[in-house]
Image (tube, helix red, strand yellow):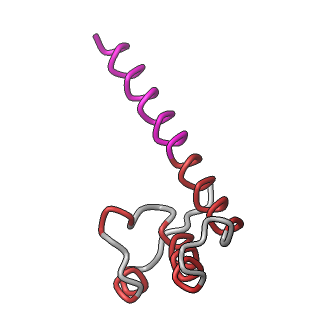
Amino acid sequence: MTDYTASKEDAMKHRLPINYRDSCSALLIPLNICRHKNLYMPWECTDERHTYEKCQYEDMLRRMKVLAKQKAAAAEEE
């Protein structure tokens, strides 16, 4: 999986809230720029939004796999 994490300087420059500074934060920056430029019109910025949401979904799947492995390891220890 490719990591799309924005640097701390980029996140601060583009005023990303701390809870959005995850592994997809570099994709959120151009999405927010597009949203501001187009006044948050829902039919604009669809490519950027889709890319960001796909990254979020893949990150969730990755975290679920890690949790399943941890649960399996804990069950084997018992």
Rendered-image quadrant of the N terminus: bottom right
Give the x, y percent position of residue 10: 43, 85
Residue nearest the observer in this picture, 53 or 40: 40
Q: Quadrant of residue 9?
A: bottom left
Q: For this view, does 60 lie left or right of residue 12?
A: right
Give the prevailing secondary structure in the magenta stretch: helix
Query: In this image, 37 relative to 8: left or right?
Result: right
Residue 13 image-quadrant placement: bottom left
The answer to whether residue 39 is above or below residue 18 is below
Q: Position of residue 43 (x, y in %)?
A: 68, 66
**Where does residue 18 sit, x and y in percent of width and height?**
30, 68
Residue pictured at 41% horizontal, 32% vertical: 67
Q: Depth check: give the residue in front, 2 or 58.
A: 58
Please say if 7 is above or below 4.
Answer: below
Q: Residue at x 66, y 59 (%)?
A: 50
Please tell me which residue lies in front, 40 or 52. Answer: 40
76 over 32 or under it: above or below = above
Quick check: 56 left or right of 10? right
Question: Quadrant location of the C terminus?
Answer: top left
State the residue at coordinates (37%, 13%): 76
Q: Which residues are magenta?
A: 60-78
Residue 3: quadrant of the picture: bottom right
Q: Residue furthest right?
A: 47
Which residue is found at the position 39% from the left and 80% from the top? 11
> Camera-side residue: 45 or 10?
45
x then y, percent, for residue 42: 61, 65
